[in-house]
Image (spheres, rainbow, N blue to C red):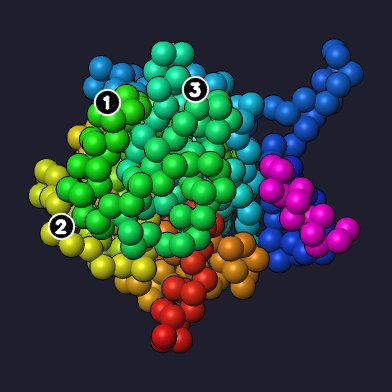
Amino acid sequence: MPHLLIWCHILRGHFLSASTTLLTWSKILSPRRELDTKTNKFQTPRIKTGNWMEPNSEITKEKYGVDISSIREAQGRIDPYIHKTPVFTSGSLNDMSRRKLFFKCECFQKGGAFKFRGACNAIFSLNKDQADKGVVTHSSGNHAAALALAADLRDIPAYVVIPNNAPNCKIQNVIRYSGQIIYSQPTLQSRETTTARIMQETGAFLIHPYNDVRIISGQGTIALELLEQVQEIDTIIVPISGGGLISGVALAAKSINPSIRILAAEPCGANDAALSKAAGEIVKLPETNTIADGLRASLGSLTWPVVRDLVDAVITVEDQEIVEATKLCYEVLKVVVEPSGAIGLAAVLSDTFQNNPAWKDSNRIGIVLSGGNLDLGALWDSICGP
């Protein structure tokens, strides 16, 4: 099968045989289809996770704003629009990590990142009066593109406030999906002030990049898929920034299996989540400095309680480790992943993880490759210098 056709199949969300020449070094996992003798049809069974048990009654909507029912409702709402992304494995990376790793490839999601799940859930949750006025957000890129794409699917306007130093590849994605761009200074205050002005001028409805229960619920569908695709995962490693992704994953995964371990991966140059966990309250950094441009936001009022209670630990890694992980994704998995998306691999290969005796029982690890909107020029400069 020609390589282009193979990648077209992957991007459409289909799963390929591990015998495919392009993927001989890796495997794509999906539930095995079994013959139902009553209907004489093949069915895809629901696969049990780890230690199968009753749902976690400690995770409630009253406590966190989102529960497993919210996430399952989001799954039903967005199912017609999203890709069910594949899971890759690699013997080489298993050997390097001394674990079995399962890569949830959200880099193959529509818009190139996991953000489309939350944006799609938020857009299609709006009533007609809200939707007719359009939506607005501020974002450094992936949420912006995701919101523009979801709004385009519903045929409503999307106003996107983007800092003027955002990666060009992410700006082009917003333009590609018919989003209306308004530039701001690269500070949170400027982004929020500009967003407030657009809301006043247009009446557009605000969709926050992460501090929104609809966004969190949408991102949680990643965990529902992963735990159906792979049996007995005991740990999931997730990039952390504002916390929408890891909150959704933690709420879903720990609702299904309370014993599952949720680890956050964070750049040393934007380590507010690690500092917040240590302090027991939200810590905001005056500035951040990391190649992982999608991981520079601070935790929100809705995401912090989830991170505080349900995320077991935060692993911080240096930019050079992130760059090496990004290269490994390409060289070994043959997957293009942005630095923010590759940080989970950097975390599992780090000395912090490998030398921690508390995590020796983490043997079957899901890693969310959260996005693939890579600025190749910036990555090249980080490796070779300008």
Q: Quadrant of the C terminus?
A: bottom left
Q: Is residue 334 above or below residue 208?
A: below
Q: Dot 2, how many residues are within 10 Å of its Cα: few (below 14), some (14-19), or many (20+)?
A: some
The residue sitting at 25% across, 57% down in the picture is 186
Foreground tag (2 vs 1): 2
Describe residue 386's horizontal placement relative to residue 188 as left or right.
right
- Report x, y in % for residue 270: 25, 61
Q: Secondary structure at mark 2?
A: loop
Mark nearer the N terminus (3 vs 2): 3
- Report x, y in % for residue 211: 29, 35
**Residue behind mark 1:** 64
Q: Secondary structure at mark 1?
A: helix
Distance in Å between CA atoms under marks 3 and 2: 34 Å
**Residue behind mark 2:** 285
Q: Which amino acid does the dot numbered 1 rest on?
A: Tyr
**Residue behind mark 3:** 124
- Report x, y in % for residue 263: 35, 50
Q: Quadrant of the N terminus?
A: bottom right
Quadrant for residue 110, please give it. top right
Foreground tag (3 vs 2): 3
Q: Which amino acid does the dot numbered 3 rest on?
A: Phe
Q: Is residue 206 above or below residue 359?
A: above
The residue sitting at 51% across, 49% down in the picture is 175
Quadrant for residue 315, please give it. bottom left
Instruction: Tell me, yes or no, whether the highlighted magenta stretch contains residue 11.
Output: yes
- Report x, y in % for residue 285: 15, 57
Q: Dot 1, how many residues are within 10 Å of its Cα: few (below 14), some (14-19), or many (20+)?
A: some
Mark nearer the N terminus (2 vs 1): 1
Mark nearer the N terminus (1 vs 3): 1
Distance in Å between CA atoms under marks 2 and 1: 24 Å
